[in-house]
């Protein structure tokens, strides 16, 4: 599966987003740390992200758990 | 009865049922043990001695009249301080939560009490259930009864310490990224993170509702089965809960393990294990082999994407829960919890939605691939010794994500997948600190995990070892 990396988010955007979207002041140094953490999450997650999914998939997690259970494991 | 506090949950219930012990004596023994150990491990935030003794006397009167509440009649328990009850004083390990109105009682605790259990107190925890070590700047750090200089693991930190120190025989915890399994592993206990949807989270403090699970920490798998039987089941207040039944009888624990196939921990997951941990895991696999199980190599995918997707959900939902307080009461959070929650404001909504949308697909792929040909998967929890409180007391925000990731690397992916996982004690290291591994099963396979853990414990006996207050109180 091809992996399409999002570009890293800048510390400046993190600081601005914190202030303007969430009302939380973030010091410059802390914004650098948060940008690095977000970049780590994005890089690791992207290996599992497919290009497309159909309508029925996003709401199937609970049904999938139930469907994958084996009766003999629960007795 | 020499020391009723030394009995496990099943033994206490049996002693009361046979008339060898009263509920009042069981509670009194628990309270005495709490008085001895609390100064050492700091496991409780509130002790409800008078209410517990009053309920015990009422249960004793009922029993004398032939009226038994259920299989936990008279058994003293304590729980992580994150379950609501009207008029309660739940803290969630925080100074922010007290004083907020509480909803109807949390069914997890209410069901235990309906089965006859007595709640003697509410247990210390990581602030807002966010922290894998058990540090708490508001109520004091949790300390490990096997060596109080070491962490208990978190966030169900007091649940781990209280049960290991025999203050109570069982406790509820919650697990969003490892918060039952880590303290179970670090205190030498069985800890069951159930399948997502097995136990109602209604009335419990959320960390991340798409990942949160509630389960027991006990010394034995049999006790964990008893408690799970009481709390499992559908609850209209938590629409994620399954109607799939949990067995009423514990007879399933004795069904032989022979013929079952155990997946070996993938080599990549054990690559950073210390020699002591690797040897302990190998020895545990040998025990399962002696029980008649076959070991098989498995093809497991890299855990990093599953970890990151779970992390994206956890951070996003925690930021949503805490948004108002993060703006208005930021100074009331510890640096650790504030910094971890703060990151959630910057995960894009699209990433969060990808993470939630793909869970079914990735779960299906994981079960089809990794569980092909096996019944249960063995996996590490910690691949290194239980750290000290000082080692993990990260003051710099830059160091916290790596510390948390190191501790939760092998636990968080299974929260994302929703699979049940049981922490199993497998011995002690040269420092006398517990070692553990986890048994991971297909969805709703808790009875199978508990059965294998029970038979392992019958064959080994690690659960019979007990921390001593004399050793715990020794100066460093």
Image (spheres, coloured by chain):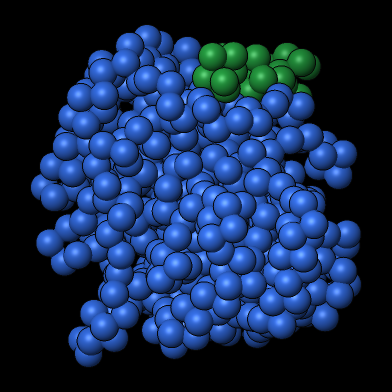
Chain colours: A green, B blue
Q: Is residue A61 left or right of residue B127?
A: right
The image position of residue A45, as x and y in percent, is 50, 36
Q: Which residue is more in the foreground, A32 or B376?
A: B376
Residue at point 80% right, 57% down? B65
Q: Which residue is more in the foreground, B41 or B5?
A: B5
The image position of residue B220, as x and y in percent, is 42, 48
The image position of residue B218, as x and y in percent, is 47, 53
Residue at point 59% right, 58% down? B19
The image position of residue B92, as x and y in percent, is 67, 70
Residue at point 67% right, 20% down? A66
For residue B307, say whether it is visible.
no
B281 over B58 or under it: above or below: above
The N terminus of chain B - image quarter: bottom left
Residue at point 63% right, 23% down? A65
For residue B238, say whether it is visible.
yes
Total marks drawn?
Answer: 0
B374 over B454 or under it: above or below: above
Q: Is residue A16 left or right of residue A68?
A: right
B70 over B77 or under it: above or below: above
Q: Which residue is more in the foreground, B217 or A2?
A: B217
The C terminus of chain B - image quarter: bottom left
């Amino acid at each position: 599966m091809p992996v399409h990396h999002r570009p890293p988010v800048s510390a400046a955007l993190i600081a601005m987003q914190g202030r303007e979207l969430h009302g939380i002041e973030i010091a410059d140094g802390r914004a650098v740390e948060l940008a690095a953490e977000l970049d780590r999450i994005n890089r690791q997650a992207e290996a599992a992200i497919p290009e497309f999914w159909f309508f029925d998939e996003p709401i199937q997690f609970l049904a999938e758990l139930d469907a994958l259970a084996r009766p003999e494991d629960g007795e | 009865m020499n020391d009723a506090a030394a009995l496990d949950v099943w033994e206490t219930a049996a002693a009361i049922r046979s008339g060898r012990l009263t509920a009042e004596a069981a509670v009194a023994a628990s309270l005495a043990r709490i008085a001895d150990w609390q100064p050492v491990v700091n496991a409780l935030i509130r002790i409800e001695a008078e209410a517990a003794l009053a309920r015990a006397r009422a249960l004793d009167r009922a029993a004398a009249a032939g009226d038994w509440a259920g299989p936990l009649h008279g058994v003293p328990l304590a729980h992580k301080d994150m379950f609501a009850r009207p008029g309660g004083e739940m803290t969630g390990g925080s100074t922010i939560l007290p004083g907020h109105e509480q909803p109807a009682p949390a069914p997890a605790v209410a069901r235990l009490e309906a089965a006859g259990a007595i709640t003697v107190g509410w247990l210390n925890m990581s602030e807002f259930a966010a922290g894998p070590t058990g540090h708490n700047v508001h109520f004091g750090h949790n300390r490990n009864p096997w060596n109080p200089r070491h962490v208990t693991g978190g966030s169900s930190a007091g649940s781990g310490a209280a049960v290991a120190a025999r203050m109570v025989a069982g406790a509820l915890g919650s697990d969003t990224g490892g918060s039952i399994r880590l303290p179970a592993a670090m205190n030498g206990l069985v800890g069951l993170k159930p399948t997502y949807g097995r136990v109602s989270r209604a009335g419990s403090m959320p960390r991340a509702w798409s990942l949160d699970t509630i389960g027991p920490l006990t010394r034995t798998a049999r006790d964990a089965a008893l408690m799970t039987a009481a709390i499992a089941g559908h609850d209209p207040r938590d629409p994620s809960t399954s109607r799939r039944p949990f067995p009423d009888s514990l007879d399933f624990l004795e069904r032989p393990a022979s013929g079952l196939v155990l997946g070996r921990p993938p080599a990549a997951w054990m690559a950073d294990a210390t020699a002591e941990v690797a040897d302990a895991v190998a020895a545990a696999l040998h025990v399962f082999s002696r029980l008649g199980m076959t070991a098989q190599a498995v093809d497991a995918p890299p855990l990093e994407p599953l970890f990151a997707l779970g992390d994206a959900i956890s951070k996003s939902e925690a930021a949503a829960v805490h948004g108002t307080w993060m703006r208005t009461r930021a100074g009331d959070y510890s640096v650790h919890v504030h910094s971890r929650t703060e990151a959630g404001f910057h995960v894009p909504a699209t990433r969060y939605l990808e993470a939630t949308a793909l869970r079914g697909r990735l779960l299906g792929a994981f079960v089809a691939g990794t569980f092909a040909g096996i019944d249960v998967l063995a996996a590490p929890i910690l691949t290194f010794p239980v750290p000290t409180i000082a080692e993990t007391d990260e003051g710099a925000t830059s160091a916290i994500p790596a510390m948390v990731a190191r501790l939760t690397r092998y636990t968080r992916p299974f929260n994302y997948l929703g699979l049940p996982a049981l922490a199993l004690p497998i011995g002690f290291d040269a420092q006398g600190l517990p070692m553990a591994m986890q048994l991971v099963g297909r969805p709703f396979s808790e009875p199978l995990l508990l059965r294998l853990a029970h038979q392992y414990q019958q064959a080994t006996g690690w659960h019979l070892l007990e921390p001593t207050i004399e050793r715990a109180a020794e100066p460093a």
